[in-house]
């Protein structure tokens, strides 16, 4: 009886082993026929070593495509196939005819950190949370009536900008020179802070109307987040090392920058929520008030504290991306 059981177990094991070999062989053969051309990957890790050696990654990919003389390429990073395209015709196939397939945001470590775990609209993959936050933004923040409601705050910051530029021109210590890029960046910072928090500076600012240390740190951290937001991060392709091994340093940089941003924003949000709960504040003055006072049909808050914080981080960040270039 034991001999028969052993024989059956041996036959089953042999069959499963042969089936696995057959599956792996033919899967590789089928994938090789379906996937676009690309560099030969290493087992398990793919082309990650080449990616780490060649920075910035997009230039390395573009150089590979030129060397191989192709308009579409497949590069395997870890267990993920990355498809790069330079042809407008192929790009239209992705963005128009296959729009439903590629409409969702990619899941990646920098976006996860910046959005507090995909709580905001702009960085969340398509799903319930994305639909909820998108509805809030389109109906309560980006509407025409809200744009008119914030008109006076925008005018106030435009007037402040003119005064600051005038003071810079009259400054004999700098020869009247004005760094337009810096002025533009901090004007955007002043404006978005005014519309969201109803205040220009986190601290006292400078005597000439310029940003203080707090505002400079805040703006620099925002641009750092934008620089790394959808960059090539190793842990996106080998998820098991996330939080354990930060090979390219992206996780450390993103967490530090996000902490710097939230260090100035979160206390203001917590204090404002407390004011509304205590009844010491009753009038809506800015976007933060709008988000806090949104209610569900049963009278409970529509957005949680963490959702408000995450949405404000992303809103400030994308405002900089759309209005100011580093």
Image (tube, rainbow, N blue to C red):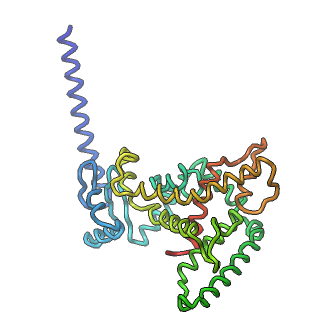
Q: Position of residue 321 (x, y in %)?
A: 54, 69
Q: Position of residue 183 (x, y in %)?
A: 57, 79
Locate residue 237 relative to residue 183 in the image: left or right. left
What residue do we see at 66% from left, 57% from top?
268
Observer-nearest of 2 and 276: 276
Tell me where residue 90 sits by quadrant: bottom left
Above-or-below relation of 248 to 23: below
Q: Position of residue 264 (x, y in %)?
A: 60, 59
What residue do we see at 66% from left, 71% from top?
191
> Which quadrant would the N terminus be assigned to in this image?
top left
What residue do we see at 31% from left, 55% from top?
76
Q: Position of residue 232 (x, y in %)?
A: 38, 60
Q: How many labels, in total?
A: 0
Observer-nearest of 280 and 24: 280
Tell me where residue 252 sits by quadrant: bottom left
What residue do we see at 20% from left, 28% from top?
14
Tell me where residue 57 sits by quadrant: bottom left
Above-or-below relation of 10 to 152: above
Above-or-below relation of 184 to 304: below
């Amino acid at each position: 009886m034991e001999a028969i059981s052993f024989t059956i177990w041996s036959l089953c094991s042999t069959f499963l082993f042969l089936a696995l070999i057959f599956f792996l062989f033919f899967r590789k053969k089928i994938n090789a026929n379906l996937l676009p051309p690309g560099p030969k990957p290493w087992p398990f890790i793919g082309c990650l070593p080449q990616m780490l050696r060649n920075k910035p990654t997009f230039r390395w990919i573009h150089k590979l495509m030129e060397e191989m003389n192709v308009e579409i390429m497949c590069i395997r990073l870890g267990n993920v196939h990355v498809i790069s395209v330079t042809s407008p015709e192929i790009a239209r196939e992705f963005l128009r005819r296959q729009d439903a397939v590629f409409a969702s945001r990619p899941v990646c470590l920098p976006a996860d950190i910046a959005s507090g775990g995909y709580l905001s609209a702009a960085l969340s993959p398509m799903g319930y949370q994305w639909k909820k936050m998108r509805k809030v933004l389109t109906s309560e923040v980006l509407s025409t009536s809200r744009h008119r409601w914030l008109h006076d705050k925008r005018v106030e910051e435009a007037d402040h900008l003119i005064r600051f530029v005038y003071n810079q021109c009259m400054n004999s210590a700098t020869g009247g020179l004005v760094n337009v890029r810096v002025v533009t960046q901090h004007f955007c910072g002043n404006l978005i802070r005014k519309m969201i928090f109803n205040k220009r500076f986190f601290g006292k600012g400078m005597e000439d109307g310029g940003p203080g240390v707090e505002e400079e740190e805040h703006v620099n951290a925002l641009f750092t987040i934008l620089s790394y937001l959808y960059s090539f991060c190793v842990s996106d392709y080998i998820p098991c090392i996330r939080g354990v091994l930060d090979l390219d340093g992206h996780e450390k940089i993103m967490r530090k920058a996000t902490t710097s941003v939230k260090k100035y924003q979160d206390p203001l949000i917590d204090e404002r929520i407390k004011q509304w709960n205590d009844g010491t504040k009753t009038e809506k003055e800015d976007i933060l008030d709008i988000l806090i006072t949104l209610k569900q049909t049963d009278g409970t808050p529509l957005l949680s504290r963490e959702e408000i914080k995450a949405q404000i981080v992303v809103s400030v960040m994308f405002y900089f991306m759309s209005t100011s270039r580093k």
